[in-house]
Image (cartoon, rainbow, N blue to C red):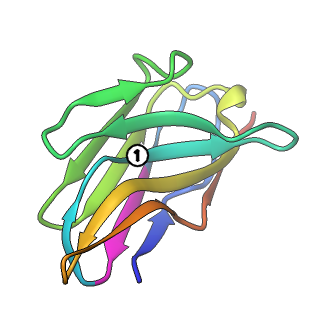
Amino acid sequence: QVQLVESGGDLVQPGGSLNLSCAASGSILAVYAMGWYRQAPGKQRERVALITPTGSTNYADSVKGRFTVSRDNAKNTVHLRMNSVIPEDTALYYCYVERVMLTGPRYEYNVWGQGTQVTVSS
């Protein structure tokens, strides 16, 4: 069983910064693409940023230039640096892993964390 645990969500003022972290745990041999989704009340979940094991990234247009996703393959962690936040960034942020190779080898797909709340308010 692969577990994803997020941390770092908080209340922050517009224009401020925040760092989110996610750690994957289990009998992990390799973690493939990782990233972040978010869901605001009454809205559908949307992709924020993804990063491959080699460091290639994709960002939602709404966060380009403001957010930075990074990862540490040795620690099976992924991070999101949120700069110049705006009220529209308010959401529950979910860590996401598209594929994990486990001992066996076995694979698990589309693994989600429990979410960490980010609230941007003045």
Horizontal side of 96 relative to 42 (left or right) equals left
Camera-side residue: 7 or 106? 106
At x 24% / y 41%, what residue is drawn?
52
Among the 4 quarters of the image, the one containing residue 39: top right
> Residue pushed farthest right?
42
At x 51% / y 34%, what residue is drawn?
48
For the question of whether residue 119 can be seen, the reply is no
Horizontal side of 4 relative to 32 (left or right) equals right
The N terminus sits in image quarter: bottom left
The spot of residue 84 in percent (x, y) is 51, 24
Q: Amino acid at mark 1?
A: Gly
Q: Is residue 21 magenta?
A: yes
- Where does label 1 land, which residue? 35
As drawn, 65 above or below 96: above
Q: Is residue 115 magenta?
A: no
The C terminus sits in image quarter: top right
How many other residues sit within 10 Å of disc 1, few (<14), some (14-19) or many (≥20)? many
At x 18% / y 46%, what residue is drawn?
53
> Disc count in the image?
1
The spot of residue 31 in percent (x, y) is 24, 60
The spot of residue 120 in percent (x, y) is 68, 38
The spot of residue 8 in percent (x, y) is 49, 59
Camera-side residue: 98 or 56? 98
As drawn, 83 above or below 8: above
* Secondary element at tag 1: strand
Q: Which residues are magenta?
A: 20-26
